[in-house]
Amino acid sequence: MTPGARLQSAIEILDRILARQPAEQALTNWARGHRFAGSKDRAAIRDHVFDCIRCKRSFAHLGGRTDGRGLVLGLLRDAGTDPETLFTGEGYGPRKLAQDDMPDPAPMPRAVALDCPDWLLPELDRSLGANTDQVLLAMRHRAPVFLRVNEARATREQAAALLAADGIETRPVPLANTALEVTAQARRVRQSAAFADGLIELQDAASQAVIAALPDISGAKVLDYCAGGGGKALAMAARGADVTAHDADAARMKDLPERAARAGVQIACCARPEGVFDLVLADVPCSGSGAWRRAPEGKWALTPDRLAQLRTLQQEILAKAWAHVRPGGCLAYATCSLLDVENDLAVACFATTIGGRSPSNTLNLTPLDGGDGFFGSLIHKAI
Ligand SMILES: C[S@@+](CC[C@H](N)C(=O)[O-])C[C@H]1O[C@@H](n2cnc3c(N)ncnc32)[C@H](O)[C@@H]1O
């Protein structure tokens, strides 16, 4: 496909997403209907689409319109590319520029320039203070691809060498001593020997940092109360913990037994946890605001009502998870949120309801630290 044809495809897919089709579904449907498109075409179109979702407000401003065509015009103008060179009307490319394709002449308001919903900006200002603009500007770009080296199978150096043999270049990152950033050939990771042999998993570096910040869990009985796909359960098992995984939606854990077998660790999955544990991790559902580089649709879907529902659910989960902490044990609370109301304020509120125990070991990461935005905090239970 020509660069113009890729842009036209992105325009069509974006129009479906703007009509409320989920992005992954719109991309898959498009690929099914265009089997001639090769993997490089699909990857390039996917990148265009996700770039446009991440920067929806500023690109619409630069494109002078809010549809897929406007977003792609904004994408080009933001990158300093004159759209006339690609919007030629030739072949399968976008039609030529017209009067209604000009940028919005008004200055960009701050929330538009930062690609942030208006209602959320004051909330982020309260949470991030002077860093707000820098964090939101960082969120306009693609996230790096990070790997977690399975400590139970290899050192970071050994894993990096095996990946290099498959042409995948990496570099160690300081956020966690298990983390590698992929600097070239990220799309080959799942086909690599290191992946097949369980030496690595795809996992954000900040997620890894949250697990690295837990106290010594080797040999400890651990409950992952909101295990989801099991990324953190696997990381805790690699640190030598005896992990039980639970999720309200058990189907989300369906790949966990296979992933655990590949990693050479054992994790029990349970629908209804029983008894008490040395440590309970509550990696709760949240706004996902720390991960909006990877999942940008969430930024535009979040509403004040949804945030309020999430805050209520977070307190309910904390209370249920707390019941599984043994006396003398601890509860680890985690979110991939940048918002104080889901982080410090949520743990402080819960600590008050259980009699004023102070949260400790708090970790508050933003994309400026390299990985996703992530929050972690511990609450100890008295003996
Ligand atoms: C942030 S995700 C967990 C991600 C996972 N820990 C990982 O590292 O891949 C939150 C999970 O909480 C689950 N969840 C939602 N409500 C829950 C509840 N009331 N009790 C337990 N899990 C719940 C969701 O199904 C979802 O999988």
Image (spheres, rainbow, N blue to C red):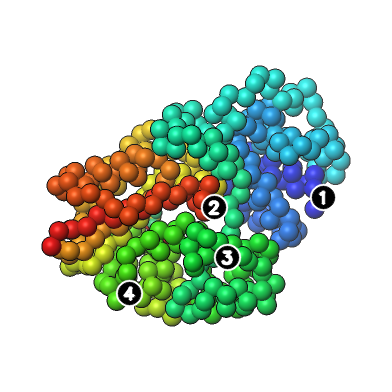
Give the Cα distance between marks 4 and 3: 24 Å
Q: Are marks 2 and 4 in contact (CB under 8 Å)?
A: no
Q: Which mark is residue 218?
A: 4
Give the Cα distance between marks 2 and 4: 27 Å
Q: Which mark is residue 2?
A: 1
What residue sits 82% from the left and 50% below the top? 2
Q: Are marks 2 and 1 in contact (CB under 8 Å)?
A: no
**Foreground mark, 2 or 1?**
2
Q: Residues within 10 Å of mark 2 (few under 14, many from 20)?
A: some
**Foreground mark, 3 or 1?**
3
Along the line of sight, the residue nearer the viewer: 286 or 365: 365
Q: Secondary structure at mark 4?
A: loop
Give the Cα distance between marks 3 and 1: 36 Å
Where in the figure is residue 48, as x and y percent of width and height?
68, 46
Along the line of sight, the residue nearer the viewer: 308 or 162: 162
Q: Which mark is residue 172?
A: 3
Tell me which amino acid carries mark 1. Thr
The residue carrying mark 2 is 370
Q: Secondary structure at mark 3?
A: strand
Q: Where's the C terminus, which quadrant?
A: bottom left
